[in-house]
Amino acid sequence: MKKIPLFEQCVANVAPEVMEEVNLNIDIANRIYDLLKAKNLTQHEFASRMGKRDSEISRWLTGTHGFTTATLAKISAVLGEPIVEVRRESKTKYIFMTMPSYNSSLGISGNSYTSHETNTCVISYKN
């Protein structure tokens, strides 16, 4: 690919947060486009399901549109797939297991215990 010095100079002067926003908008547009292709949906069918005009969907897919979280949620619901995923700390999961425990103060006969109580043991783990 041929580099154009003037373009390179202009891009170099763009604030990092602006570049990040532009890249994010393009990534979102590409994700929507990929899902439309995978689901064999036309822009017109998608617009109809979203309750939008075709021209608005076309504008979305240029990568210049800034999406609200409400719009992203609706797109996800219509397409049945997440558009943007946020990393979440994995939640601790708990397993409750019954385990026999022996009460040493009851029924000691030689080296064995004759009384058993059942208690619950909680084990936690993270994915």
Image: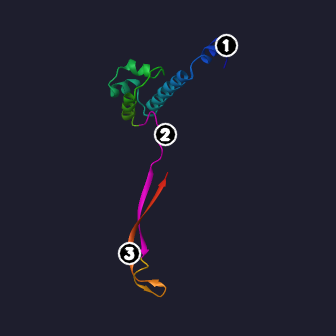
First in sequence, mark 1 or 3: give its number. 1
- Which marked residue is nearer to the observer: mark 2 or mark 1? 2
Disc 1 from disc 3: Cα separation:
80 Å
- Residue 17 point in image, percent of width and height: 53, 23
Looking at the rendered image, the quarter that the N terminus falls into is: top right
First in sequence, mark 2 or 3: give its number. 2
Residue 7 among magenta residues: no
**Taking 29 as reference, is 75 left or right?**
left
Residue 84 among magenta residues: yes
Q: Name the amino acid type tagged 1.
A: Pro
Q: Quadrant of residue 12?
A: top right
Say few, some or many: other residues with alpha carbon within 10 Å of mark 1 (under 14 / 14 to 19 / 20 or more). Answer: few
Give the magenta range: 81-102
Q: Residue at x 47, y 37 (%)?
A: 86
Q: Quadrant of residue 9?
A: top right
Task: Judge whether 55 appears above or below 74 on screen.
Answer: above
Say few, some or many: other residues with alpha carbon within 10 Å of mark 2 (under 14 / 14 to 19 / 20 or more). Answer: few
Q: Name the amino acid type tagged 2.
A: Arg
Q: Are marks 2 and 1 in contact (CB under 8 Å)?
A: no
Q: Which residue is mark 2?
A: 87
| Mark number displayed over residue 5 | 1
| Mark number displayed over residue 57 | none
Q: Residue at x 47, y 19 (%)?
A: 64
Q: Residue at x 33, y 28 (%)?
A: 49
Q: Name the amino acid type tagged 3.
A: Glu
Judged from the image, the secondary structure of the residue bearing numbered disc 2 is loop
Disc 2 from disc 3: Cα separation:
43 Å
**Which residue is at the front of the view, 74 or 117?**
117
**Which residue is at the front of the view, 87 or 52?**
87
**Which residue is at the front of the view, 76 or 90?**
90
Q: Which residue is mark 3?
A: 117
